[in-house]
Image (cartoon, rainbow, N blue to C red):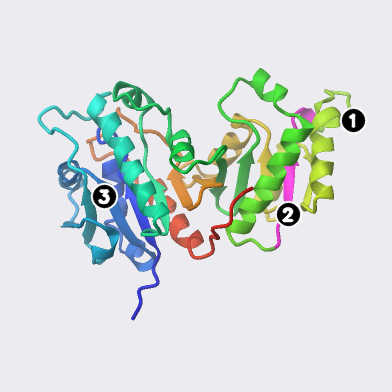
Amino acid sequence: MTDKRPLIAIPMGDPAGIGPEITAKALAKKEIYEICRPVVVGDVQVFQKAIGIIGANININLISNPAEGAYDFQTVDFIDLDNIQMEEFEYGQVQAQCGKASYEYVNLSVELANKGEVDAIATTPINKESLRAGLVPFIGHTEMLGELTNTDEPLTMFEVQNMRIFFLTRHVSLKEAISQMTKERVHEYLLMCDKALKRLGLNSRKMAVAGLNPHSGENGLFGSEEIDEIEPGIKLAQEDGVNVTGTVPADSVFFQALSGKYDAVLSLYHDQGHIAAKMTDFHRTISITNGLPFLRTSVDHGTAFDIAGKNIAESISMEECIKLAAQYAPKFTNNTMD
């Protein structure tokens, strides 16, 4: 009988961070194996050390490709890249070998996804400084995935409970973010967001765009950005058939989405959407990268070097990350975002 559980690749992240620990803790939960077939890509000595630290009853099955996995609870199927010198390894420290290794785990996971050997990727934290020390020419997952898949602009979406949030701008100053809020960009992003939701299996989609100024500018009383750029961009998207409304004042739109009024919200800048998601449930806010040839979910926290190797890190985010990958993988379509 064919095993219909989706195959999920898990690159274990920066070895010096909490990635190996939270992966081991998540895979010690039986419910993960009930919904998917997880395969870890990493360094087996580091992972064995993590298992020892958390005291889990887990065996390791070394494999060279996902087809060889058993995917039974209490046995982690593991692709070992053997790229950490344990005599030089130290938790909680920026290390060139760890930055380089974390990139290699992602790289192989992407290769597996591109070849269709796994259905999705669920990523763990990597560290910008370690990547730099390891001479990796990327500052994070998004940039890596964009290059490795030849995707010009991967689209980030947060999901927490039943609320989904897209981001018009990312890691730029608020002043620069406002300058990027053109009608053309709003129009383009709404088209991308609508297609992204369709790829995730949402056939009936309603979006809202958050306002920038208090009360969405109050018809120009508190700012003209909504009138001059944002709402004209929304109108262009509506003319293209996108079911979107806005702008909706930012102090209410996220609550309305959480209540089910909207399937997704387009946040205009980084903190606007991040605060809304993380105040809803910090540990269960999961990032999904749309626009790639495959589904990718990610925890939305860092390597936590200060607690790495101490059996302190919670695995809730990692569990939710894997569960969301398993939930969407059967619905995800491989249509391009163009």
Q: Which residue is denoted by mark 1 in the rendering?
A: 219
Q: Callout 2, which amino acid?
A: Lys
Q: Which residues are magenta?
A: 204-214
Q: Is residue 4 left or right of residue 158?
A: left
Q: Is residue 57 above or below residue 237?
A: below
**What is the C-alpha distance between the residues marked 2 and 1?**
24 Å
Taking the spot 59% from the left edge, 54% from the top edge, the residue there is 162
Taking the spot 14% from the left edge, 32% from the top edge, the residue there is 85
Percent x, y for residue 247? Answer: 79, 39
Q: Callout 1, which amino acid?
A: Asn
Percent x, y for residue 267? Answer: 66, 37
Q: Is residue 273 above or below residue 4?
A: above
Question: Which corner quadrant holds the N terminus?
Answer: bottom left
Percent x, y for residue 178? Answer: 71, 24
**What is the C-alpha distance between the residues marked 3 and 1?**
53 Å
Q: Callout 3, which amino acid?
A: Ala
Q: Which residue is denoted by mark 2 in the rendering?
A: 206
